[in-house]
Image (cartoon, rainbow, N blue to C red):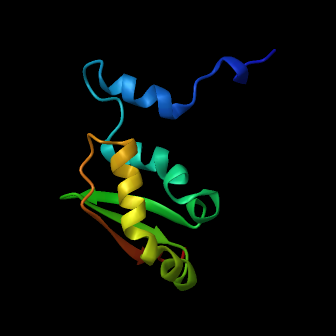
Amino acid sequence: MAFAAGMEQAKSILPRLLHHGTPVFTNLELIQGYWQEAVGPLLAVRSAPVRLAGGWLAVDVEGLPWLELMTPMRSQIVECLRSELPDIVVRGIRFRLKEPA
């Protein structure tokens, strides 16, 4: 059975869900859904959007080397999110080191 063959990508479904009344997802959840597309698979597993307030996105990053790698990409990531999620205001990103578990 080809279950996956008939499934649409979340990217194409999420915007349609938002246009049918009450939002199904929060803005942060939508950003989290697009995160891998915005930063790529390698950085997506080492970082996570954790808060969106006043247009500022807080992103936890796994360690200092990854934070240093992502910092120069800040404006590129913001532009990608704005392009993919135009109804969500993202003014900028604040990276922070993830607290050890």
Residue drawn 42% across the image and 30% down it: 14
* Residue that protrudes farthest toward the left in the picture: 54
Residue drawn 66% across the image and 17% down it: 6
Q: Is residue 1 above or below residue 64?
A: above
Q: Is residue 20 above or below residue 63?
A: above
Using residue 79 as the reference point, say whether residue 12 is left or right of it: right
Which quadrant: the C terminus?
bottom right
Using residue 1 as the reference point, say whether residue 89 is left or right of it: left
The number of numbered discs placed on residues in the rendered structure image is: 0
* Percent coordinates x, y for residue 20 in the rendering: 30, 18
Which residue is nearer to you in this view: 76 or 18?
76
Using residue 66 as the reference point, say whether residue 58 is left or right of it: left
Residue drawn 49% across the image and 34% down it: 11
* Percent coordinates x, y for residue 49 in the rendering: 42, 59
Which residue is nearer to you in this view: 59 or 37?
37
Which quadrant: the N terminus?
top right
Residue drawn 37% across the image and 23% down it: 17
* Percent coordinates x, y for residue 92 in the rendering: 28, 65
